[in-house]
Amino acid sequence: MFSILGGVFLGWSLGANDASNVIGPAVSSRMLRFTTAAFMASLFVLMGALLQGRSGIHTLSGLTQMTLHQAVLVSISAAITVTLMTIARLPVSTSQAVVGAIIGIGVVNRYIDTTGLGKVVICWVGTPVGGAILSVVVYRTLATVNNRLRLNLLESDALLRIGLVAAGSYGAFALGANNVANVTAVFVAAGHISITAATLIGGLSIGLGILTFSRRVMDTVGSRLVRLDPFSALVVLLAQAITVHFYTFVGVPVSTSQAVIGAVIGIGLLKGIQTVSVRTLLSILSGWLLTPLIAAALVLAMQKL
């Protein structure tokens, strides 16, 4: 079972990078403490992986055929890529890193399921767009409800805290359900572990990443791209969670980073385009473009060793 350590490393790096997307806005808006949010997110990630993580595993495991050795190379290459981006404080797509590495193996094996790959790429494009649209819809809906409730300051603050806990929990559940495939699908494809074991190992490793190394990326999402007040943070969390959970039912692992950045941009557009940091946005977009290329290059280089 030592070969599965590559998947554990990938799950750890995924949790470290993507936790910012499900609890970053709540922590950055100072409505939740990091420790509380991290433990809560780890629990719901595991629940999502165990209860709804199978469909994404089926999709990724069918993109190409691979040996156990190649599965290890894919997971290590993707993990290194995501870890480098985490150190650079860029919220990137673990899905893109994994698929980039899988494509690299597919080139070596001279077989790629182009139909399945096309489905994945289309969903990638739809993720940030969907996040942006949903954030606008959710913002206006919740604003209307809030205005009709006519709460005082203390009541509004208490309701926001409850909402952020609920939205963060839902987002973590969606992260586990959708992204556990990125961690262990290649080992299912290699016939090394069962899908049940894959969801358990993947969920636990993602939770470990959240608890130990996820705080670095949160500043980028929660404050440097667009300054988020607590209400906007709630909207972003809900929009990204709904977006990612939708693609779980489609059976395609997508990027929580892309969903949350799309949602944050949607908030920025509502508040005025001048509130969006173009420099930070361009840095994030460059990370998205480089992620699959770096992962593919790494796995090809490792394959030759």
Image (spheres, rainbow, N blue to C red):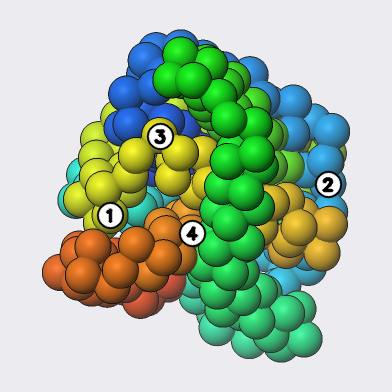
Determine crowd level at label 2: few under 14, some 14-19, many 20+ residues with C-alpha closer than 10 A. many
Label 3 element class: helix
Q: Which residue is mark 1?
A: 226
Q: How many marks?
A: 4
Q: SS at mark 2?
A: helix
| Contact? badges 1 and 4 (CB < 8 Å) | no
Q: Quadrant of the C terminus?
A: bottom left
Considering the numbered disc 4 on the image, is that residue within a helix, a strand or a loop? helix
* Percent of width and height locating residue 208: 48, 22
Q: Nearer the viewer, residue 271 or 282?
A: 271
> The disc labelled 2 sits on which kind of residue?
Arg
Q: In the image shown, does 149 or 58 lie closer to the viewer? A: 149
Q: Is residue 88 left or right of residue 162?
A: left
Marks 2/3: CA–CA distance: 34 Å
Residue in view at x 20 percent, y 50 percent: 224
Which circle, 1 or 3, is nearer the viewer?
3
Query: Residue at label 3?
Result: 230
Q: Are marks 1 and 3 in contact (CB under 8 Å)?
A: no
Name the residue carrying label 2.
54
Residue drawn where x is 52% and y is 67% of the image = 132
Residue where numbered disc 4 is placed? 263
Res 136 → quadrant: bottom right
Sequence-wise first label, 1 or 2: 2
Question: Which sits in the foreground, 59 or 158?
Answer: 158
Single out the mark in the foreground, 2 or 4: 4
The N terminus, quarter of image: top right
Residue occupying the point 58% across, 56% down: 140
Q: Amino acid at mark 4?
A: Ala
Tell me the element at label 1.
loop
